Amino acid sequence: SGQGLAGVAADDSENAAGDSPRKRNPRLHIATFSDMYDPRLMLPMVSAYANGLSPMILGLGEPIGWEAGMGRVWNSYRNFVWNKTEPEDVVLLFDAYDVMFQAGEAELLQMYHDVVARTGREIIYNADLFCSSSRKVDYPACTTPWCYLNCGIIVGRSSALRKLFKETLRPDTKVSD
């Protein structure tokens, strides 16, 4: 679409018989945050384009720093979810520099729907086998090898993400807050 979002065009027009409008197909919206142009953006962007996807880069020109300022990243994601998507759409948010796309929209949506059907969860985070955080002891007990959440990828229905992103954060919020 014109806003750099991957997705299937909605067809809300009346059908040929003049009946009520057709139900709109959910769209896949993909976004990342980078406060500056960085050559490392090429890995996710080129791999996305090669798979027919057009991620949106949020935050260009908004310096944040890693620790303080993470509230601005969260709020950029929040504004994207609330203002650029419909509740039934699927939204994929990803780390700007170290994600590589290996599937197109149809396959990504199918994988998302498969996980939702299997788990009943509407928001899915990627997870790691190992934890490098100094707060490792604060993590709850886990029964799978994937114990350590990593927000490098978050995917979910916009309606569920709107609950996660209900409140804005102070712009100077730190990662540790």
Image (tube, rainbow, N blue to C red):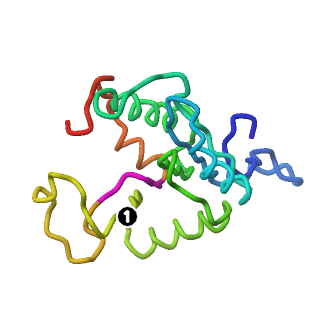
Label 1: which residue? Answer: 121
What x and y, as percent, mark residue 46? 69, 51
Q: Is residue 154 magenta?
A: yes
Side of 140 where 170 appears, left or right: right
Quarter assignment of residue 3? top right
Residue 58: say if magenta. Answer: no
Q: Position of residue 32 (x, y in %)?
A: 52, 42
Residue type at tag 1: Arg
Q: Would residue 93 be found to the left or right of residue 164 on screen?
A: right
Residue occupying the point 54% across, 22% down: 61
Quarter of the view holding residue 50:
bottom right
Quick one: label 1, few (<14), some, or many (20+) residues within 10 Å?
few
| Residue at screen point 38% across, 35% down | 74
Name the element at disc 1.
Answer: loop
Q: Position of residue 1 (x, y in %)?
A: 74, 41
> Residue at the right extreme?
16
Instruction: Give how far across and how far down residue 17 sits, in percent.
Output: 87, 54
Magenta residues (range): 149-156
Compare residues 177 and 96 and report the one nearer the observer.
Answer: 96
Q: Is residue 108 above or below residue 39?
A: below
